[in-house]
Image (spheres, helix red, strand yellow):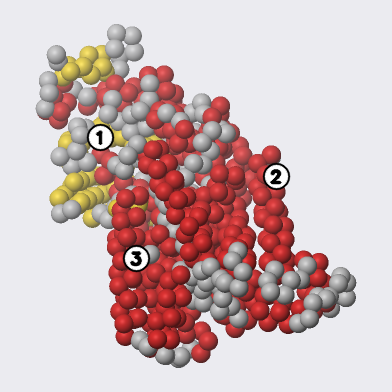
Amino acid sequence: MLTAYKRMGLIGFLVVALVVVCLVAAGKGQVPISPAEVAGSLLHRLGLHVGPLPSAVQGENALWLVRFPRVVLAVVVGASLGCAGALMQGVFGNPLAEPGVVGVSSGAAVGAAAAIVSGVTFLGAWTTAAAAFAGGIVTTFVVYAMSRAAGRTEVVTLVLTGVAVNATAGALLGLLMFRTDDDGVRAIAFWQLGSLAQATWAAVAVAGPCAIAGLLVAVALSRKLDLLALGERPAQHLGVDTERLRITAIVATALLTASAVAFTGIISFVGLIVPHLIRMVAGPGHRVLVPASALGGAVVVVTGDLIARTAIEYQELPLGVLTAVVGGPAFFWLLRRTRARAGGWG
Amino acid sequence: MKATGVSVSLGGRTVVSSVDLHASPGEIVALVGPNGAGKSTLLAALAGDLPFAGEISLRDKPLRSYRPVVLARQRAVLPQKAALSFPFTVGEVVRMGRAPWAGQPEAADDEDAVVEAMRLTETTGFAARPFPALSGGEQARVALARVLAQRTPLLLLDEPTAALDLRHQELVLSAARDRAAAGAAVVVVLHDLGLAAAYADRAYVLAGGEVRREGPPASIFTAELLSSVYQHEVEVLPHPRTGTPLVVPRR
């Protein structure tokens, strides 16, 4: 089976790529540390006394207090976005579905912003994530209910629903900004741009478990998502409880989006572009697509964040802006291609 | 499979009203009738897709009591139109037919079932091609291969011959007859009355959501009945060699 090797090779390649970009990303910054020293520092903490330790002054602190939480959060966010994209596309039966495009990210951001502005802390550090999850799940259900007809989602309906949802969410965010003080305005503006600058271990401790739970559910659903590609009724005829699949997938999408949005704001298009590239290499089977999209998303976000904070010295580009600069044109291209293949919008 | 007094309403309109139908192992049952007669709706009700009034039982158990996956090991359904959201290859699509058997002892036959189904539908040559790249008729045969690979004792086929050329129409219905000979029950919606007459053991002639006549095609396909059902004068002639009825519209 050549294709089986190809697929395993893809997963292996993505794992290696992720490890490499993580080591490089952790080393870059105002205190430069070589990838070997980064690996050495990690291994020493794990009790394996091999490899060099950071030679720079404050190198160890820079790594463990600033860079590692940021890189790990980038991995969590990227994996969540990539996986959420693959999952949504599978459930909607449409390769253009993505949390950012259809407005689920905005919905989650409204939830998170509402929690920040109102100052509620009923769940401690988990409050923002819980509010983002609530916002995400409501939006996903709304989009799903509005954009499906006869078991399918037409591209136009989906994208237009996204426009409407994004507009509504933007209005709610605006209202929240209007109602809050200067600090609140800055906090919400940061959400809309998307950035990993606020990464801490505490954020990782909240976003990580959400992402892992969502990923595990997505992997568990992957076989059924394959069958759903045949359409809702044929999937039922093959024994899939489509109602349950749909609800589980929506909850998992909301979990993943919440973990991506809660501490970093809206980073769009990762969930659109990554699964698309994976499909071009490994085909549409979800058993490879879901884990490979998670890995690929992590690679993209870690790399993107590295560029965002090193491209301009002593300044940081918002990551969400960077992904949109690349993702926007790619979305155009995908739209045109999908349209050409379908012979119009039908 | 046995249906008693089955009625289906769609959007407030009764599309199928109090239909009695049964299909036993080893026979091909054809549902025929004009457009809008309720054939596909009746088939969808038999498949468990639509809410219905009345009783449908499969192996003496009410259809409603089946869990989806258990039902999927009993009956396979060929939809009128094959669709696919992502470009899976033909081989992958046919293999999807084996999904209900995952984790069952029958999963050992997966490879066998797929190869056989593709041979019967003459789709083996396409195995590596993406499904959306095939022509309509080829897609229809692949969809049938998926349904055959499911290896269920009941087959519900909605117009399996609609997109096919003459040779492949015969191929598909021969495959259905082989399945029936092996003990399966086949319920098939057909537009071509000649095909129905040649392959079906029994036929139900539907019109306006009701069964107008039921029985072996040779005895119920009469010019009188068909002319009234289709609202067009038809002639029914016995084939000079085989004697099966040939239905010809009067022109």
Q: Residue at x 18, y 18 (%)?
A: B249
Tag shown at residue A203:
none
CA distance separating discs 3 and 1: 53 Å
Chain bearing tag 1 is: B
Which percent across, then down, holds residue A18?
Answer: 68, 61
Image quadrant assignment for residue B245: top left
- Is residue A205 at least partly visible in the picture? no
Chain bearing tag 3 is: A
Circle 3 residues within 10 Å: few <14, some 14–19, many ≥20: many
Amino acid type at mark 1 = Tyr
The one nearer the camera, B140 or B190, is B140
Do dots 2 and 1 share one subunit?
A: no
Whether pointer 3 and pointer 1 mark residues with C-beta atoms closer than 8 Å, the reply is no
SS type, badge 3: helix
Image quadrant assignment for residue A64: bottom right
Tag shown at residue A5:
2
A126 lies left or right of A61: left
The residue positioned farthest toward the right in the image shown: A50
Quadrant in which the N terminus of chain A is drawn: top right
Chain bearing tag 2 is: A
B236 lies left or right of B1: left
SS type, badge 2: helix
Q: Which residue is mark 1?
A: B204
SS type, badge 1: strand
Do dots 2 and 3 share one subunit?
A: yes
Q: Nearer the viewer, mark 2 or mark 3?
A: 3
- Is residue B230 at least partly visible in the picture? yes
Q: Residue at x 43, y 33 (%)?
A: B139
The one nearer the camera, A253 or B194, is A253
Q: Which residue is mark 3?
A: A166
Which percent across, then down, holds residue B240?
Answer: 29, 8
